[in-house]
Image: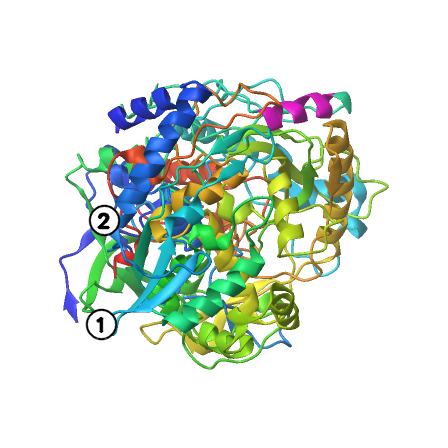
């Protein structure tokens, strides 16, 4: 084992959170920063050859290599967890930029009430409305505290959108940096229909930008070309904000920041309650110790949690006793193509980009009265022209067609191909005592370390919510002129077979007190003050909308605290 | 990048008529491109239906295709605008097989042809070269489950835990060949359908169905979607670099630019993942 010269800061993971932190520290401090990324190097220009659906969307060329490490899954503690042998339900990225390279680029802010679900639900409906076995809790910060950082994150990305159209949006200190994207046909149908039914569609905030834009770091990106190759692809023109085109060019000029690829961190090293560095295996297989005065984990929800468990930092969550916090409050997102619309008209649906369209928040959060309903909270609902590609989307036929192959199916699928589209329903996923992460007793990674184990299932709140949302969206679909509207229910049990989103959250949650959380609101470990954990693992539960803008805003808030306070006087920030 | 993008925009703005003409030329180039890329050679093999297999002197296995099979009048599904596909008169190409032998390719090809048949609606798996696609995928790391978590123990789970089998796609196809039987390709279409219905619930059939769809609609660099035939059937234009001038136009009206492969769009060859071992 080799020990390297110490660094001031070691950051584990070179995705959005890790590279944003590195860029901020590189620009605003003299600290030496080492970013350890287990994947390969990437450059902004890597994606010109990448507009291939088979390799990238179906074979998942940009994703984490599941042959080396995966996660096991079961529904309840009574079941046997088995490894996810092929990612599908969520798709973690790998390499410089992480999932931020292949992401879709949908960047809403969370609703202000998302940060106080516990308090607000009880205040409006009473404690009895919180579901059985829930472990919902407030974040410990308010929207207003995060607002300036939301604005900075939007300006970093150049987010396209328009304020003032969504009556439920939180206070904004600035207009979106770029105007909304062009309106595709399918979202335009949704706008008219939704408005006729009293909803308030507004352009979905998009990190694929509508016009050329120069961000505060001087990074210039061009406008979206609506090519239809966003999610699961890197952007070949750089219109979609990605760490490689937004952060890497800045970091490349910073002498104090080093990105070390092929570096798979296995442990956070610690002594006497302080982190002393990290141990990783390099691309050649050698074990290396990187001492550091400050360690920051930014390796996505699952790996952040796993590193704390493997490194024996903090008390692992024990479901039976309810003790311990590391691993608890695992949430995903009941995202589904819950509503499929069949039209008699062509939609030209090959055109578009990931966040190209509109959303409504009328049925999100607590924007509507849940008094008479059998669920709490809501869903972020979108109608996007996201660019439908043929392999993934061919074969969807109206329910009257029972055949799934052969001439009858072929004819129906060809007829339906360009007349079919989906409304996206991203349902909020509450936290439950029964959904959590721990280490698997059986399965191991390529180094022999235990895999992480997910224990998770849907509960009534998710089923009831999706049923309600699907019925509402069926009305909108009819008003859009769809010949047929299909609304299958949320599958009875959580599965790892169908894609939902890559928005797993929790495991190292933040909160107002060490009595109920792993991190304080500065994402600093309560007990180990020179360890920070960035990213969605800090979310106490998963609000409906896409999480990346909030992750960036939180990272900027933490960076400010480190630059302004911690760097001058290391120690607990709360 | 900038130059490519501009070129893409210009192409996208062409009139439909120009699009058809250029499409013919590009598809011709596309086929020739394939001929060079994948060691296609002319042969004098006898053509039986559209697919014939011959054995080479060096004991390599070849699949012989008739290029006339990919001609004919195709119809887009939604606007019913007819478009003639490029066809070369009576040429034959021999494709070296990478995984199957001739018999196996005949059998799997026949099964794919029942999943996505050639019929009055338009061409199907035989014309698109689906069997060539599947053969190449099985020869690639995908066929060996190189990118799948393969650590034991392998245990049966519930469906929500996903496929837990140890068998790789290669092994699943080997098993599938047994399920189909050694004379599957010689059965009548009705008999073939009956056989396939009896194995519909198997993992092999689901994989074959998925791979058939992939072979119909993948970029031609992977060996399927020959002459962009799959994309023409459904009116999918391929990976153009820009729809910026169109995304908010053509509301409710069919917009059907002539299909282009990724190689056509970029003006150079792109290496598919399966070629990078």
Question: Observer-nearest residue: A127 or A97?
Answer: A97
Q: Residue at x 57, y 45 (%)?
A: A139
Would residue B161 appear left or right of A493 to someone viewing this image? left
Q: Residue at x 59, y 30 (%)?
A: B80
* Residue A137 marker: none
Q: Chain of mark 2?
A: B
Q: Would residue B59 be counted in the magenta stretch? A: no
Q: Secondary structure at mark 2?
A: helix
The span picked out in magenta is A185-195
Quadrant where the image shows the N terminus of chain A: bottom left
Q: Magenta: predominant secondary structure element?
A: helix
Q: Is residue B211 above or below residue A32?
A: below
Tell me how far mark 2 sits from mark 1, CA to CA: 21 Å
| Rendering coords of residue B70 (x, y %) | 43, 46
User: In front: B44, or A135?
Assistant: B44
Whether residue B209 is visible, yes or no, is yes
The quarter of the picture where residue A481 lies is top right
Other residues around mark 2 within 10 Å, as few (<14) / some (14–19) / many (≥20): few
The quadrant holding residue A372 is top right
Question: What residue did someone put label 2 on?
Answer: B36
Label 1: chain?
A: B
Whichever of callouts 2 and 1 sits on the residue coming sooner in the sequence is 2
Q: Which mark is residue B57?
A: 1
Q: Residue at x 28, y 62 (%)?
A: A264
- The reply to the same-chain question for discs 2 and 1 is yes
* Secondary structure type for disc 1: loop
């Amino acid at each position: 084992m080799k020990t390297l010269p110490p660094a001031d800061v070691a950051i584990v993971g070179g995705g959005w959170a890790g590279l944003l932190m590195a860029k901020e520290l590189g620009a605003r401090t003299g600290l030496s920063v080492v970013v350890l990324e287990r994947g390969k190097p990437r450059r902004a220009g890597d994606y010109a050859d990448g507009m291939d659906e088979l390799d990238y969307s179906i074979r998942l060329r940009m994703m984490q290599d599941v042959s080396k490490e995966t996660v096991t899954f079961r529904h309840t503690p009574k079941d046997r967890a088995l490894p996810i042998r092929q990612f599908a339900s969520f798709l973690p990225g790998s390499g410089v930029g992480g999932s931020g390279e292949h992401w879709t680029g949908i960047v809403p802010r969370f609703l202000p009430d998302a940060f106080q679900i516990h308090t607000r639900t009880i205040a409006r409906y009473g404690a009895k409305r919180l579901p059985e076995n829930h472990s919902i809790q407030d974040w410990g910060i308010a929207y207003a505290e995060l607002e300036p950082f939301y604005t900075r994150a939007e300006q970093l990305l150049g987010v396209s959108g328009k304020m003032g159209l969504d009556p439920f949006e939180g206070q904004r200190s600035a207009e979106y940096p770029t105007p909304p994207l062009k309106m595709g046909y399918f979202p335009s149908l949704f706008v008219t229909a939704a408005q006729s039914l009293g909803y308030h569609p507004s352009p979905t905030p998009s990190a694929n930008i509508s016009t050329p834009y120069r961000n505060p770091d001087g990074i210039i990106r061009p406008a979206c070309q609506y090519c239809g190759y966003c999610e699961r692809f890197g952007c070949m023109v750089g219109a979609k904000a990605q760490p490689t085109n937004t952060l890497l060019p800045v970091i490349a000029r910073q002498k104090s920041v080093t990105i070390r690829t092929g570096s798979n961190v296995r442990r956070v090293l610690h002594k006497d309650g302080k982190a002393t560095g990290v141990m990783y295996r390099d691309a050649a297989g050698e074990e290396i110790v990187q001492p550091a005065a400050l360690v920051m984990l930014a390796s996505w929800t699952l790996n952040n949690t796993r590193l704390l468990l493997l490194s024996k930092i903090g008390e692992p969550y024990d479901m039976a006793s309810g003790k311990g916090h590391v691993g608890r409050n695992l949430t995903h997102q009941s995202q589904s193509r819950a509503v499929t619309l069949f039209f008699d008209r062509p939609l030209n649906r090959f055109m578009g980009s990931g966040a190209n369209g509109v959303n409504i928040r009328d049925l999100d959060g607590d924007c509507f009265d849940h008094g008479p309903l059998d669920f709490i909270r809501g869903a972020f609902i979108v109608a996007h022209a996201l660019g439908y590609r043929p392999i993934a989307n061919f074969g969807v036929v109206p329910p009257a067609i029972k055949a799934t192959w052969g001439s009858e199916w072929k004819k129906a699928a060809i007829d339906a191909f360009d007349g079919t589209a989906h409304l996206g329903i991203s349902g909020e996923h509450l936290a439950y005592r029964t959904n959590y992460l721990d280490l698997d007793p059986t399965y191991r990674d390529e180094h022999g370390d235990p895999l992480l184990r997910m224990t998770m299932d849907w509960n009534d709140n998710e089923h009831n919510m999706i049923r309600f949302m699907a019925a509402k969206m069926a009305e909108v679909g009819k008003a859009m002129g769809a010949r047929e509207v299909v609304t299958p229910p949320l599958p009875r049990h959580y599965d790892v077979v169908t894609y939902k989103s890559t928005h797993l959250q929790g495991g190292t949650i933040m909160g107002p007190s060490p009595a109920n959380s792993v991190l304080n609101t500065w994402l600093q470990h309560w007990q180990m003050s020179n360890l920070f954990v960035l990213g969605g693992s800090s979310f106490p539960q998963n609000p409906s909308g896409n999480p990346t803008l909030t992750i960036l805003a939180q990272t900027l808030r933490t960076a400010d605290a480190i630059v302004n306070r911690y760097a001058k006087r290391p120690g607990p920030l709360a | 990048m900038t130059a490519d993008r501009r070129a893409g925009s210009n192409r996208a703005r062409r009139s439909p008529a120009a699009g058809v003409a250029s499409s013919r030329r590009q598809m011709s180039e596309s086929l020739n491109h394939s001929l060079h890329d994948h060691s296609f050679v002319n042969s004098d093999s006898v053509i039986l239906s559209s697919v014939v297999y011959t054995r080479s002197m060096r004991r390599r296995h070849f699949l012989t295709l008739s290029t006339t099979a990919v001609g004919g009048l195709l119809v887009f599904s939604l606007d019913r605008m007819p478009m003639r596909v490029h066809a070369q008169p009576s040429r034959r190409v021999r494709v070296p097989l990478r995984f199957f032998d001739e018999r196996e390719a005949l059998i799997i090809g026949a099964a794919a042809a029942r999943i996505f048949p050639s019929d009055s609606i338009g061409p199907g798996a035989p014309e698109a070269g689906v069997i060539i696609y599947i053969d190449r995928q099985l020869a690639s790391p995908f066929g060996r489950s190189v990118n799948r978590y393969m650590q034991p123990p392998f245990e049966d789970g519930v469906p929500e835990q996903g496929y837990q089998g140890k068998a790789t796609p290669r092994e699943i196809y080997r098993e599938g060949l047994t399920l189909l039987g050694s004379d599957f390709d010689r059965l009548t279409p009705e008999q073939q359908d009956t056989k396939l219905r009896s194995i519909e619930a198997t993992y092999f059939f689901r994989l074959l169905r998925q791979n058939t769809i992939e072979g119909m609609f993948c970029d031609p660099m992977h060996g399927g979607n020959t002459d962009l035939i799959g994309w023409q059937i459904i009116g999918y234009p391929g990976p153009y670099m820009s729809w910026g001038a169109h995304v908010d136009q053509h509301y409710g009206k069919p917009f059907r630019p002539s299909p282009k492969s990724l190689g056509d769009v970029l003006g150079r060859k792109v290496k598919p993942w399966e070629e990078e071992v």
